[in-house]
Image (cartoon, rainbow, N blue to C red):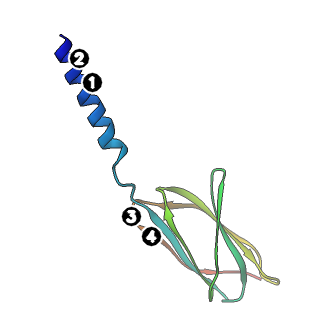
């Protein structure tokens, strides 16, 4: 009986160890804002966390994101209006391309 308990305990420890050290596959979000000079910043919101990305020639990129659903917030320069894109899904090892985002005046 004692050997059975030890064997089961070892199996549980090894199983938990295998789960704990599995690779987490990360994804990303990319997009292009037009007109190129319309946006001042781009932020990514997931529950209580917020990330910011640089906007370079209208292009922004978020990398190393866990699988989930995010909201993209674009702060615009005058005379353009801010934009919000909700429910952007990121899957393991995939980059979600939002394509061209045209800001309105």
Quick one: SS at disc 1?
helix
Name the one closer to the observer, 48 or 9.
9
Q: From this view, report whether residue 52 is shown above or below residue 80.
A: above
Estimate the x, y position of residue 78 in percent, counting from the top left. Answer: 82, 83
> Callout 4: helix, strand or loop?
strand
For the residue carrying disc 2, how many other residues have a C-alpha within 10 Å: few (<14), some (14-19), or many (20+)? few
Above or below for 59 versus 42? below
Closer to viewer: mark 3 or mark 2: 2
Residue matched to label 1: 9
Residue corresponding to mark 3: 93
The residue labelled by disc 2 is: 5
* Residue furthest top in the image: 1
Question: For the residue carrying disc 3, how many other residues have a C-alpha within 10 Å: few (<14), some (14-19), or many (20+)?
Answer: some
Q: Which of marks 1 and 3 is in front?
A: 1
Q: Do the residues labelled 2 and 1 touch (CB within 8 Å)?
A: yes
User: Which mark is first along the chain, 1 or 4?
Assistant: 1
Q: Quadrant of residue 10?
A: top left
Q: How far apart are marks 3 and 4 (CA)?
A: 7 Å
Label 2 sits on a secondary structure element that is helix
As measured in the structure, the alpha-carbon distance from the residue carrying label 3 to the one carrying label 2 is 39 Å
Residue at (30% x, 32% y) in the render: 13
The percent coordinates of residue 96 (x first, y second) are 47, 69
Task: Give the quadrant of residue 82.
Answer: bottom right
Quadrant location of the N terminus? top left
Lower sequence index among marks 2 and 4: 2
Q: Is residue 53 left or right of residue 4?
A: right
Tag 3 or tag 1, which sits nearer the N-term? Answer: 1
Q: Mark 4 points at which residue?
A: 95
Separation of residues labelled 2 and 4 (CA atoms): 46 Å
């Amino acid at each position: 009986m004692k050997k059975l308990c030890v064997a089961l305990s070892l199996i549980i420890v090894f199983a938990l160890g295998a789960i704990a050290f599995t690779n987490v596959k990360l994804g990303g979000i990319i997009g292009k804002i037009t007109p190129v000079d319309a946006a001042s910043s781009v932020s990514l919101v997931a529950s209580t966390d917020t990330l910011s990305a640089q906007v370079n020639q209208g292009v922004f990129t978020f990398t190393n994101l866990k699988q989930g659903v995010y909201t993209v917030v674009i702060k615009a320069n005058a005379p353009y209006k801010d934009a919000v894109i909700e429910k952007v899904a990121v899957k393991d090892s995939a980059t979600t391309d939002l394509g061209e985002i045209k800001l309105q005046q």
